[in-house]
Amino acid sequence: MTYPWLLYLMGLIYIIAGVYHFINPKIYLKIMPKYLPYHYPLIYLSGFFEIVLGISVCVPSLKNISIYGIIFMLIIFLLVHLNMLVNKKASLGIPKWILFLRIPIQFGLIYWAYWYLKF
């Protein structure tokens, strides 16, 4: 089976995002909800999983389980997006309208991943 190029693009996006967790963890530290413990380990762990899921979504035998992992991860990341919306310091000075826009985009990313379960 030939994979659609958008599936490879999805994988690449998660790999790049995951690598960035290791390159610049301090930016993620600023947006982490205060009620979560162990901020740095969570930043590195989420980056690791983004990389692993981004790679494995491109492997036919791992694609479906990877997609479920991506969907789960994106749902968990909603906590960060909501935290940025309600916490001025965590918003990093991003305008509220952009922070609001990120919520439906997050659901769009979830749908994008879900779409490939049937291929």
Image (cartoon, rainbow, N blue to C red):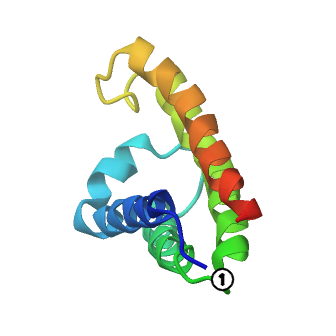
Expressed as whole percent of the image width and height from the top left, the position of residue 101 reads 49, 21
Expressed as whole percent of the image width and height from the top left, the position of residue 27 reads 29, 49
Residue 18 found in image quarter:
bottom left
- Residue in view at x 50 percent, y 78 percent: 52
Element at label 1: loop
Residue 11 position (above or below residue 115) = below
- Residue 41: in sight, yes or no? yes
* Residue projecting furthest to the right: 118
**Pointer 1: what residue?**
62
Expressed as whole percent of the image width and height from the top left, the position of residue 33 reads 54, 42
User: Is 111 positioned to the left or the right of 4 in the image?
Assistant: right
* Residue projecting furthest to the left: 23
If the image is split into quadrants, where does the C terminus sit? bottom right
Q: How crowded is mark 1: few (under 14 residues within 10 Å), some or many (20 or more)?
A: few
- Residue in view at x 31 percent, y 60 percent: 25
Residue 53 position (above or below residue 30) = below
Which amino acid, by three-letter code, is at mark 1?
A: Leu
Residue 94 found in image quarter:
top left
- Residue in view at x 47 percent, y 78 percent: 55
Depth order, front residue of 30/18: 18
If the image is split into quadrants, where does the N terminus sit? bottom right
Expressed as whole percent of the image width and height from the top left, the position of residue 104 reads 59, 27
Residue 6 position (above or below residue 98) = below
Residue 96 found in image quarter:
top left
* Residue projecting furthest to the bottom: 61
User: Is 20 positioned to the left or the right of 104 in the image?
Assistant: left
- Residue in view at x 56 percent, y 83 percent: 59
* Residue projecting furthest to the front: 1
